[in-house]
Structure formats: structure tokens, C-alpha cells
Image (cartoon, rainbow, N blue to C red):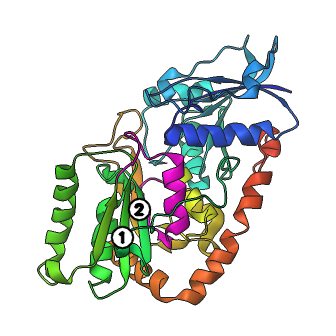
């Protein structure tokens, strides 16, 4: 079959990373793959980065796969016989008006990260008597440019990080849905200044020092009534060292040096940085409701409890992706705090998870979407 893939795989952000990973999994199939890059932001991956599949040309395609925002998708039978949409759905569908499902209703098939997302979306589409089929696609990760070792270290030249257990968080601390506030509060609650631990906050995007201080002070003020500032554990903020965005090399250094990644995102979808954390054997702490936990479970990850809540947030945009007809899962701080403590204390369980994590590189290297393209649920 001839497959045309359209997506933002050149972008240097989560959209780009996920899009590249899916493209690589499709390229490993038995089919002829042509790709076309699009840009959903100004964040380009590399001026010199070109996929070989961009030079493939076909007069007709059997399948068109669109990894896009919903409003940008289209359907044209003259381009391809089958249309597949990947919309990076992050939430659970409860009640979504027919008009907000225009793109999903156009597709022959929609791919979702999570079986839970897939089932909820399928039920909504069925209620509108749609023929669109929703497929839950297993996690994939482009490991081609994620080396096992690199020169340089986060701990080098920083006495405050040496001989310490490093919890680390990579993300945007301004985004409520990424769960930074819960991460910070859980950490401050679980440990004191006497514990040899550090929470490393790696900022994916550079932000002002005043904003950082304000966010951290708010968290510390919650805790100070029973744990004064002087008794609170150490926190280290690591901004991007080159440019406005944390680059891949900086990210890998943090994964390699870190002991335990913490990323209790509200959203249900897979996050590539979360998968990277597991790849580098840092046994990530995530929501049990997350798609990564659905696929890999407690053997590879630390799962925390959460509660379902409507997607109502000042930062939940655009409206066609986050509505009051959808829900996500907010982490329970008590569960997160207890799990961070266990990850620190229980070396036996941590080592068992590290052993399972060590199998992921081969797993991702071989991951192909052959059976997915043939309409099967699993590989």
C-alpha cells in the first residue's frame, strides 16, 4: 500500500516529537510511505532535517494519515481511499456537541493513544450514528537520536546535586494541566532539608525569574505553616542553557543523571518526555489514568491515584479541544507524596522497575504499526 503521512514532525516540541515517533513506526511497516511536514507553531526542529520519505512520490495513495489539529484536517477521496486522523486527544469524552466533532466525523478512522480515550470517543461517535472507527495505538518513541550515553553531566560542577537523590520534572510550570503544582507540594510535604534529595525543575521553555519565584513561593507558603522555609527540602531550577527551549542534549543529560522523573499530568494522552524518562531507566511517577500506565503498568512505572474532573481551566485552550463535555484526571497530592517517598526509600522496587525499563529501547526500536494499518488493535 502507498501511505501519505502529514504532520508536524520537524517541530522542536511535543507535537514534533510525537509526530516523528508515529512516522518512524509507520516507516517500519511493509508499506511505501511518503511524508509531508507541516508547522503548527514557529518551533522548527532543524533547518537541515529532512525525512527521506519526503522524496517519495506516488500518483495515488491508499491511506492518508493526518497528524493535525482538528480544524486543519480535510477529506478528499481523490487523494486517498482511506483517511486516518491523529488529533492528539488528551481527555475523556463525556458529552461533545456534534458540531465540535466535524473532523472526527470526516475520518474513516481516528487513532488515539489510550484505550480509555478510544472507547469514550467511539461511544460518542456511535451516538451520532457515525461509521468512524477509533483505534487505540500503542506507545512509540523515536529512539534513533536518543543515545544511551552522552558526554557531560547535570551533576558536574554543582556541589548541591552531588551525592543526592534527584527527583526531576521536565515541562512548562505555567501549564496547570502538567501537574507541576502538585509535584512541588508533594515533594515539599514528603521531605525535609535533612534528606539528601533535590527536586530538579527543568524548564522546557525559558520564563522570567520573577514568575519562577512567584510559583515556588506560592507552593512553599502552603507548606510553611507546619514546615518553615528553613526545614524545606532543596529545589534546583534548570532553565534552557542554549536558546529559549530546552534542547535534546540538555533533556537527555537530565534523564541520565536523574534518579526518578515526576510527571503527574492531568491529561490521559501519552507524552514523549514521559516515555524518554522510562527509556533512560528513571522509573517515572505518573497518573494511573495516563495512557503510558495503561500500556506499561506498575512494572515499569510508579502509578499514583487521581480523581476525574471536568476540563475547566484558564489555560485550557483551544475551545474545541477542552470543553465542559470532557474530563481529565487531577493527581491526588497525598498519593503523589507517598509514592515519591517510596521511590526514594524502596530501592528493591526501584531496581525491579529499572530492570523492566532497560527492555524498552529494544521494544521501541522494533515498534511498527503494520497491524495497526491493517485494522488490528495490537501490533
CA gap, disc 1 and disc 2: 8 Å
249 inside magenta stretch: yes
* Label drawn at residue 199: 1
The answer to which of marks 1 and 2 sits earlier in the sequence is: 2
Q: Which residue lies at the image location 76% right of the left edge and 53% below the top edge?
A: 365
Magenta region, residue range: 239-267
Q: Is residue 274 above or below residue 26?
A: below
In the foreground, 20 or 70: 20
The residue nearer to you, when weighing 102 against 356, is 356
Q: Classify mark 2: residues with Cα within 10 Å, few (<14), some (14-19) or many (20+).
A: many
Membership of 213 in magenta stretch? no
Answer with the quarter of the image where residue 296 lies. bottom right
Q: Residue furthest left?
A: 225
Kindly identify the residue that appears in the image at 49 percent across and 40 percent down.
13
Q: Position of residue 250 (x, y in %)?
A: 48, 53
Question: In the visual, does 220 lie left or right of 322?
Answer: left
Amino acid at each position: 500500500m502507498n501511505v501519505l503521512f502529514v504532520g508536524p514532525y520537524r517541530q522542536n516540541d511535543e507535537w514534533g516529537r510525537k509526530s516523528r515517533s508515529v512516522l518512524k513506526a509507520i516507516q517500519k511497516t511493509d508499506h511505501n510511505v511518503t511524508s509531508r511536514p507541516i508547522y503548527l507553531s514557529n518551533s522548527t526542529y532543524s533547518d537541515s532535517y529532512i525525512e527521506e520519505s519526503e522524496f517519495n512520490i506516488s500518483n495515488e495513495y491508499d491511506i492518508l494519515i493526518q497528524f493535525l489539529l482538528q480544524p486543519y484536517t480535510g477529506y478528499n477521496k481523490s487523494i486517498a481511499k482511506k483517511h486516518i486522523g491523529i488529533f492528539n486527544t488528551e481527555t475523556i469524552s463525556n458529552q461533545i456537541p456534534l458540531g465540535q466533532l466535524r473532523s472526527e466525523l470526516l475520518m474513516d478512522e481516528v487513532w488515539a493513544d489510550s484505550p480509555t480515550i478510544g472507547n469514550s470517543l467511539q461511544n460518542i461517535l456511535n451516538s451520532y450514528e457515525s461509521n468512524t472507527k477509533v483505534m487505540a495505538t500503542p506507545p512509540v518513541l523515536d529512539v534513533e537520536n536518543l543515545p544511551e550515553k552522552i558526554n557531560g553531566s547535570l551533576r558536574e560542577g554543582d556541589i548541591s546535586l552531588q551525592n543526592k537523590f534527584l527527583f526531576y520534572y521536565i515541562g512548562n510550570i505555567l501549564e496547570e494541566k502538567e501537574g507541576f503544582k502538585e509535584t512541588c507540594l508533594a515533594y515539599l510535604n514528603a521531605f525535609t532539608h535533612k534528606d539528601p534529595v533535590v527536586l530538579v525543575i527543568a524548564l522546557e521553555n525559558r520564563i522570567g525569574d520573577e514568575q519562577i519565584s512567584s510559583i515556588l513561593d506560592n507552593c512553599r507558603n502552603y507548606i510553611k505553616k507546619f514546615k518553615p522555609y528553613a526545614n524545606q527540602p532543596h529545589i534546583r531550577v534548570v532553565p534552557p542553557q542554549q536558546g529559549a527551549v530546552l534542547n535534546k542534549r540538555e533533556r537527555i543529560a537530565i534523564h541520565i543523571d536523574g534518579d526518578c522523573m515526576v510527571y503527574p499530568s492531568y491529561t490521559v494522552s501519552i507524552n514523549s518526555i514521559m516515555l524518554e524518562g522510562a527509556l533512560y531507566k528513571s522509573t517515572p511517577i505518573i497518573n494511573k489514568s495516563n495512557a503510558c500506565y495503561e500500556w506499561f503498568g506498575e512494572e515499569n512505572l510508579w502509578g499514583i491515584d487521581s480523581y476525574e474532573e471536568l476540563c475547566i481551566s484558564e489555560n485550557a485552550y483551544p475551545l474545541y479541544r477542552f470543553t465542559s463535555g470532557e474530563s481529565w484526571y487531577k493527581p491526588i497530592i497525598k498519593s503523589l507524596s507517598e509514592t515519591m517517598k517510596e521511590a526514594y526509600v524502596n530501592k528493591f522496587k526501584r531496581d525491579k522497575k529499572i530492570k523492566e525499563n532497560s527492555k524498552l529501547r529494544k521494544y521501541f526500536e522494533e515498534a511498527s504499526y503494520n497491524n495497526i494499518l491493517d485494522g488490528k488493535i495490537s501490533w
